[in-house]
Image (spheres, rainbow, N blue to C red):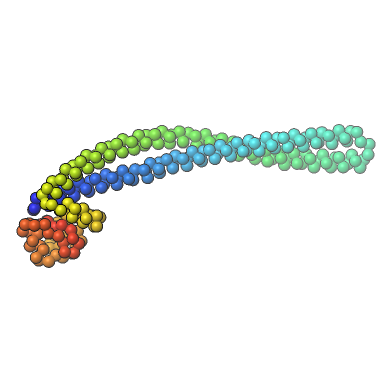
Amino acid sequence: MLPVLQKLLILQERDEKLSALRGELDRMPVEEKALEDQWQAASHRLNHLKETHRQLEVDRKKLELEIGSKQEQIGRYKTQQLQTRNNDEFSALNHQIAHAEKEVVTIEDKELVGMERASELEKQIAAEEAALKVQEGKVAEKRAVFRERRARLEEEAAKVSAQQAAVEQEVEAAQEGILSRYRRILQSKKRQAVVPVTHGSCAGCHMKLTAQTVVAVTKAQEVVACENCGRLLYSGE
């Protein structure tokens, strides 16, 4: 194999590793956002439960005031009954008292339903708070893992990038212009730019090569490209 192809294969390995590292770094914000979104959803759910509970308490106090108002009204009606000597007026007041007392029962039933709902919410809130506390601990741990992982990936990427730069210099020194050619092929194909010839075919595009191309690759006297995809070839057999 030509020395320049050997160096290109080393460079290609560095490129693949660097691409994988950068891809992992690019995916990390997505993973971190998913983690934060999960925590935020749990937090919002808890806040919603608390707000619902607060609203129930406000509604209960309103109902209590309404009950108090109705009871005062009933008291006034009863006082008026004691003061009246008119049977029709007494009967009318008695009807108003019965109606007000029925309204009090209806309001008290609403209050009871609200209190039962509030009690259920208190249990839910306690459970959600406990679950959120556990989740917060896990989130903190994962954040630490993310920080360590990012630092490790960035350090490794910097190391590979330095290695890549060194190999690039060696490639360019071995054959002028081959590095830019390699980069153009890699950018165009989005995959390997240097591939082996196996069973008379290019391992990149899997197309059959001409006998002349196969012979040229086997002799390894110059850099040979696939006539179909343009990738640089070396003998894999």
29 vs 176, left or right, is right
Residue 154 seen in render:
yes
Q: Looking at the image, which residue is at 12% across and 66% down? A: 210
Residue 112 x %, y %: 66, 38
Residue 159 versus residue 196 in the image, above or below: above
Kindly indicate the quadrant of the structure image that contains residue 111: top right
Residue 8 versus residue 131 in the image, above or below: below
Q: Looking at the image, which residue is at 70% across and 35% down? A: 64
130 vs 50, left or right, is left
Q: Looking at the image, which residue is at 77% across and 37% down? A: 70
Residue 102 x %, y %: 76, 41
Front one among 78 and 209: 209
Residue 112 seen in render:
no
Residue 190 versus residue 65 in the image, above or below: below
Residue 69 x %, y %: 76, 35
Kindly indicate the quadrant of the structure image that contains residue 50: top right
Residue 29 x %, y %: 36, 43
The count of marks equals 0
Q: Quick one: which residue is furthest to the front in this view?
A: 176
Q: Looking at the image, which residue is at 40% across and 41% down? A: 35
92 vs 152, left or right, is right
Front one among 167 and 125: 167
Q: Quick one: which residue is furthest to the right in this view?
A: 85
Kindly indicate the quadrant of the structure image that contains residue 108: top right
Front one among 84 and 227: 227
Point out the image quarter for the C terminus. bottom left
